[in-house]
Image: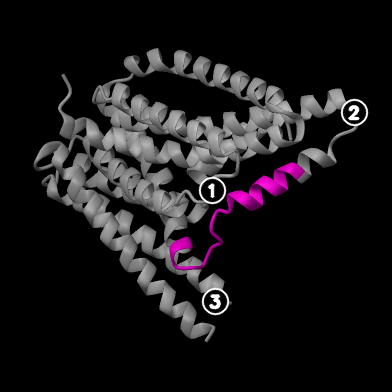
Amino acid sequence: MSVVGEVLAELWSMFAGDRRLTLLLLAVVAAAAVAARVLSAPAAVPAAILVVGALAVLCDSVLQAARKARR
Amino acid sequence: MIAWATAAPALGAAFAASTVEVVEAFTIMLAVATLRGWRPAISGALAALAVLAAVVVALGPLLDLVPLHALALAIGVLLLLFGIGWLRKAVLRGAGLMALHDEAAIFEREKARIGAGVTSARGADWLAGLAAFKAVLLEGLEVVFIVLAVGAGRGLLAPAALGALAAFVVVMAFGLVIRRPLAKVPENTLKFAVGVMLSSFGVFWTAEGLGIAWPGGDIALIALAAVFLVAALALVRLVRPRLAMANP
């Protein structure tokens, strides 16, 4: 692979190496954006969606990897 | 004048993250130097640093053109993706579900890989220089992203860049003195800490980008870091005994 190809692959893996993790995190951000911008919810609501959502995605990803490791 | 309490998280995150990346780049530079001498190693590294400097010079002014909220949102989302990914790997390594980063093994593997591609002395120098170039460029790109991400938006580029520069100087000075792979650097502990900090920055910036003001301003970063740290440590404990029960 060329140097440019390796750089692009590295950049891709930095942010989207795990497709499920990436999609779930983007869904969390989208949900927080809808709460903040569309529903005009109090600031605590989108903030809580972001914090709890990010933690839930982390848990999901780690538990899924642990299940795979046990197989 | 930037308040220390505001600058410290950016400086600390950039220093810790850059230490990890510079250690990884140094290992490959050392493999190159061991096989072909320091000349191709340093030439390759300097060429990569020149490319990275060009990237920073090209991208830096563009950041000023982006509205602050849009910049915070974009950086926040990228930091969230990057930080949670790092934290996930650090938790899995901490729980023994993923192999720890082994600088000594990487050093031997790189030496074998560069040695296998050698067909002539001149070709060997070129191949060795290219290996050093790629290592410094790829690891350096992560450093550039981290510095821009934790520093942009709040005028914290200087402390973030200082953190990265300090990591570069410390690792290179230490590495050049001992001239061995830096296998004793607690890389996973650093990655754990960096994952916590980058995830916290990610949530913080994403919310700011959405127009949400945090209670306590920048102090909220510390609370977020505490939440991510406790959750990540709990996850390590949660998945570790499960593995022990599965493989008694």
Residue A4 can be seen in this image? no
| Residue at the disc numbered 1 | A17
Range of magenta residues: B93-111
Which of the 4 image quarters holds residue B2? top left
Q: Mark 2: which amino acid?
A: Ser
Percent position of residue B207, x then y: 23, 40
Q: Mark 3: which amino acid?
A: Arg
Q: Chain of mark 3?
A: A
Q: Is residue B23 left or right of residue A55?
A: right
Q: Residue at x 65, y 48 (%)?
A: B106
The secondary structure type at the circle numbered 3 is helix
Q: Mark 1: which amino acid?
A: Gly
Residue A2 can be seen in this image? yes
Which of the 4 image quarters holds residue B118? top right
Calculate the distance from the C-alpha at mark 1 to the C-alpha at mark 3.
22 Å
Count neighbours of disc 1 (C-alpha within 10 A) and say few if under 14, some if 14 to 19, many if 20 or more: some
| Residue at the disc numbered 2 | B120
Q: Is residue B166 above or below residue B46?
A: below
Q: Is residue A33 above or below residue B143?
A: below
| Residue at the disc numbered 3 | A70
Compare residues B143 and B110 and report the one nearer the observer: B110
User: For the residues carrying marks 1 and 3, which lies nearer the camera in this image?
Assistant: 3
Residue B22 shown in magenta: no
Percent position of residue A58, x then y: 38, 59
Tag 1 and tag 3, C-beta contact below 8 Å: no
Residue B100 shown in magenta: yes
Q: Is residue B103 above or below residue B48?
A: below
Percent position of residue B244, x then y: 48, 81
Q: Is residue B103 left or right of residue B117?
A: left
Q: Is residue B118 left or right of residue B96?
A: right
Calculate the distance from the C-alpha at mark 1 to the C-alpha at mark 2.
37 Å
Evaluate whether label 1 is on the same chain as label 3: yes
